[in-house]
Image: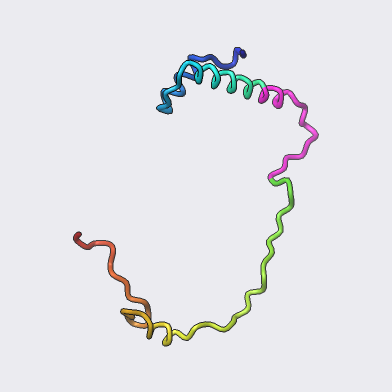
Amino acid sequence: MSDRITSEVVAKVARLARLDLYDAELASATEQLSDMLEHFADIDALDLDEVEPMTQPFELVNVMRDDVPGRTLDRDEVLAEAPDPVDGRFGVPPILGTEP
């Protein structure tokens, strides 16, 4: 086990996260977190001065079609099917400021 993290620290964090860990779970979590911290220390030890930072491993390309107007529904036909059209729009019941 590493000196980087103790079971007391893991127990405190678990308590703060409102997790009830059994002793076996606490020991397992402590070991796993210790292994992770050791791995992070290995990464920190790498000489990456000559490595260019990257934000995306693959170049992203947007595939977009041209914005060409097409055939649309007629407003009057659509509103004719609406249950309560108001001033050329769909009428909907109010949801704010009403009493239950």
Give the image location of residue 76, x and y in percent.
42, 87
Instruction: Residue at 59% x, 82% y: name it.
Output: 70
Quadrant hosting residue 87: bottom left
Label the magenta part by its dominant secondary structure: loop
98 to 22, vertically: above or below: below
Instruction: Residue at 45% x, 21% y: name it.
Output: 21
Left or right: residue 53 compared with residue 29 = right
Viewer-proximal residue among 89 and 24? 24
Which range is magenta? 39-55
Instruction: Residue at 77% x, 27% y: name it.
Output: 47
33 to 88, vertically: above or below: above
Instruction: Residue at 60% x, 12% y: name it.
Output: 3
6 to 90, vertically: above or below: above
Quadrant hosting residue 15: top left
Give the image location of residue 84, x and y in percent.
31, 79
Assign the N terminus to one quadrant of the image. top right
| Extreme residue in the left direction | 99
Q: How many marks?
A: 0
Left or right: residue 53 compared with residue 90 = right
Viewer-proximal residue among 61 and 33? 33
Left or right: residue 20 compared with residue 50 = left
Quadrant hosting residue 32: top right
Left or right: residue 34 compared with residue 42 = left
Give the image location of residue 46, x and y in percent.
75, 26
Give the image location of residue 50, x and y in percent.
80, 34
Assign the C terminus to one quadrant of the image. bottom left
Indicate whether residue 40 is drawn in magenta: yes
